[in-house]
Protein backbone atom coordinates (compact mmCIF):
# COMPACT_ATOMS: atom_id res chain seq x y z
CA UNK A 1 0.00 0.00 0.00
CA UNK A 2 2.87 2.36 0.77
CA UNK A 3 4.28 2.04 -2.76
CA UNK A 4 0.87 2.64 -4.30
CA UNK A 5 0.15 5.74 -2.21
CA UNK A 6 3.66 7.14 -2.75
CA UNK A 7 3.45 6.66 -6.52
CA UNK A 8 0.00 8.24 -6.68
CA UNK A 9 1.12 11.17 -4.48
CA UNK A 10 4.04 11.90 -6.82
CA UNK A 11 1.76 11.69 -9.88
CA UNK A 12 -0.95 13.88 -8.31
CA UNK A 13 1.49 16.51 -7.04
CA UNK A 14 3.21 16.80 -10.42
CA UNK A 15 -0.09 16.98 -12.30
CA UNK A 16 -1.55 19.70 -10.08
CA UNK A 17 1.74 21.51 -9.33
CA UNK A 18 1.60 20.98 -5.59
CA UNK A 19 3.73 19.50 -2.81
CA UNK A 20 3.03 17.45 0.29
CA UNK A 21 1.23 14.31 1.27
CA UNK A 22 -2.22 13.25 0.14
CA UNK A 23 -2.85 10.43 2.58
CA UNK A 24 -2.56 10.95 6.31
CA UNK A 25 -2.08 8.15 8.79
CA UNK A 26 -1.31 4.48 8.41
CA UNK A 27 -3.23 2.10 6.17
CA UNK A 28 -5.43 -0.05 8.36
CA UNK A 29 -7.11 -3.32 7.47
CA UNK A 30 -9.44 -5.35 9.64
CA UNK A 31 -10.40 -8.95 8.90
CA UNK A 32 -14.14 -9.47 8.55
CA UNK A 33 -14.98 -12.73 10.27
CA UNK A 34 -18.75 -12.57 10.73
CA UNK A 35 -21.42 -12.71 8.04
CA UNK A 36 -23.48 -9.82 9.42
CA UNK A 37 -20.40 -7.58 9.53
CA UNK A 38 -19.63 -8.42 5.88
CA UNK A 39 -23.15 -7.43 4.84
CA UNK A 40 -23.11 -4.16 6.78
CA UNK A 41 -19.67 -3.19 5.47
CA UNK A 42 -20.86 -3.87 1.93
CA UNK A 43 -23.91 -1.66 2.49
CA UNK A 44 -21.76 1.05 4.09
CA UNK A 45 -19.37 1.09 1.12
CA UNK A 46 -22.17 1.23 -1.43
CA UNK A 47 -23.93 4.08 0.39
CA UNK A 48 -20.77 6.18 0.81
CA UNK A 49 -21.08 8.13 -2.48
CA UNK A 50 -24.65 9.13 -1.56
CA UNK A 51 -23.90 9.97 2.06
CA UNK A 52 -20.90 12.05 0.96
CA UNK A 53 -23.06 14.02 -1.47
CA UNK A 54 -21.19 12.89 -4.58
CA UNK A 55 -24.32 11.41 -6.22
CA UNK A 56 -27.98 11.22 -5.30
CA UNK A 57 -28.26 7.54 -6.23
CA UNK A 58 -25.43 5.07 -5.70
CA UNK A 59 -26.36 3.31 -8.98
CA UNK A 60 -24.91 6.26 -10.86
CA UNK A 61 -21.51 6.37 -9.20
CA UNK A 62 -19.23 4.90 -11.86
CA UNK A 63 -16.40 4.09 -9.45
CA UNK A 64 -18.59 1.78 -7.37
CA UNK A 65 -19.09 -1.96 -7.69
CA UNK A 66 -22.77 -1.51 -6.81
CA UNK A 67 -23.91 -2.01 -10.43
CA UNK A 68 -22.29 -5.47 -10.37
CA UNK A 69 -24.21 -6.32 -7.23
CA UNK A 70 -27.42 -5.35 -9.02
CA UNK A 71 -26.53 -7.52 -12.02
CA UNK A 72 -25.94 -4.58 -14.38
CA UNK A 73 -22.21 -4.96 -14.95
CA UNK A 74 -20.04 -1.90 -15.38
CA UNK A 75 -16.49 -0.79 -16.01
CA UNK A 76 -15.09 -2.54 -12.92
CA UNK A 77 -14.71 -6.22 -12.23
CA UNK A 78 -15.44 -7.80 -8.86
CA UNK A 79 -16.72 -10.91 -7.17
CA UNK A 80 -20.16 -10.49 -5.60
CA UNK A 81 -20.82 -14.10 -4.55
CA UNK A 82 -19.86 -13.77 -0.87
CA UNK A 83 -22.44 -11.05 -0.29
CA UNK A 84 -25.19 -11.94 -2.77
CA UNK A 85 -25.29 -15.59 -1.66
CA UNK A 86 -26.92 -14.33 1.57
CA UNK A 87 -29.94 -13.01 -0.38
CA UNK A 88 -32.56 -14.98 -2.31
CA UNK A 89 -32.57 -12.45 -5.17
CA UNK A 90 -30.66 -9.34 -6.23
CA UNK A 91 -33.62 -7.09 -5.45
CA UNK A 92 -33.39 -8.15 -1.80
CA UNK A 93 -29.81 -6.90 -1.64
CA UNK A 94 -30.80 -3.60 -3.24
CA UNK A 95 -33.59 -3.21 -0.67
CA UNK A 96 -31.13 -4.08 2.12
CA UNK A 97 -28.79 -1.28 1.00
CA UNK A 98 -31.45 1.35 0.35
CA UNK A 99 -33.31 0.67 3.62
CA UNK A 100 -30.46 2.40 5.47
CA UNK A 101 -30.00 5.34 3.06
CA UNK A 102 -32.06 7.88 5.04
CA UNK A 103 -30.55 6.77 8.34
CA UNK A 104 -27.01 7.05 6.94
CA UNK A 105 -27.76 10.56 5.63
CA UNK A 106 -29.06 11.62 9.05
CA UNK A 107 -25.96 10.23 10.76
CA UNK A 108 -23.74 12.16 8.36
CA UNK A 109 -25.54 15.41 9.22
CA UNK A 110 -25.20 14.69 12.93
CA UNK A 111 -21.50 14.00 12.51
CA UNK A 112 -20.95 17.56 11.29
CA UNK A 113 -22.85 19.38 14.00
CA UNK A 114 -20.74 21.57 16.22
CA UNK A 115 -21.73 22.16 19.80
CA UNK A 116 -20.76 25.62 21.00
CA UNK A 117 -20.60 26.93 24.55
Image (tube, rainbow, N blue to C red):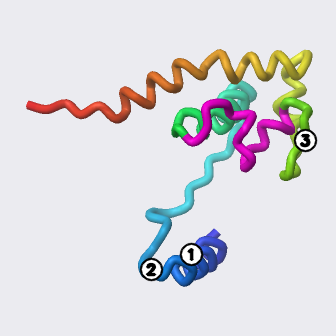
Residue furthest to the left in view is: 117
| Residue highlighted by disc 2 | 18
Q: Quadrant of residue 20?
A: bottom left
Query: Which element is circle 3 on?
Result: loop
Taking the spot 49% from the left edge, 65% from the top edge, the residue there is 23
Q: Position of residue 6 (x, y in %)?
A: 58, 77
| Residue highlighted by disc 3 | 73
Do tag 2 and tag 1 residues touch (Cβ < 8 Å)? yes
Above or below, comparing residue 103 to residue 51 in the picture: above
Taking the spot 61% from the left edge, 53% from the top edge, the residue there is 29
Q: What's the distance in space between the residues labelled 2 and 1, CA to CA?
A: 8 Å
Q: Which residues are magenta?
A: 54-69
Does the magenta portion include 6?
A: no
| Residue highlighted by disc 1 | 12
For marks 2 and 1, the one nearer the N-term is 1
Q: What's the distance in space between the residues labelled 3 and 1, CA to CA?
A: 29 Å
Amino acid sequence: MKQITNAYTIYFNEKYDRVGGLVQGRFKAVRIEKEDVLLHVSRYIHLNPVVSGIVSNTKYYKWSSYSFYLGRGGSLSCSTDDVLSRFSKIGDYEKFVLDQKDYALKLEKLKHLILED
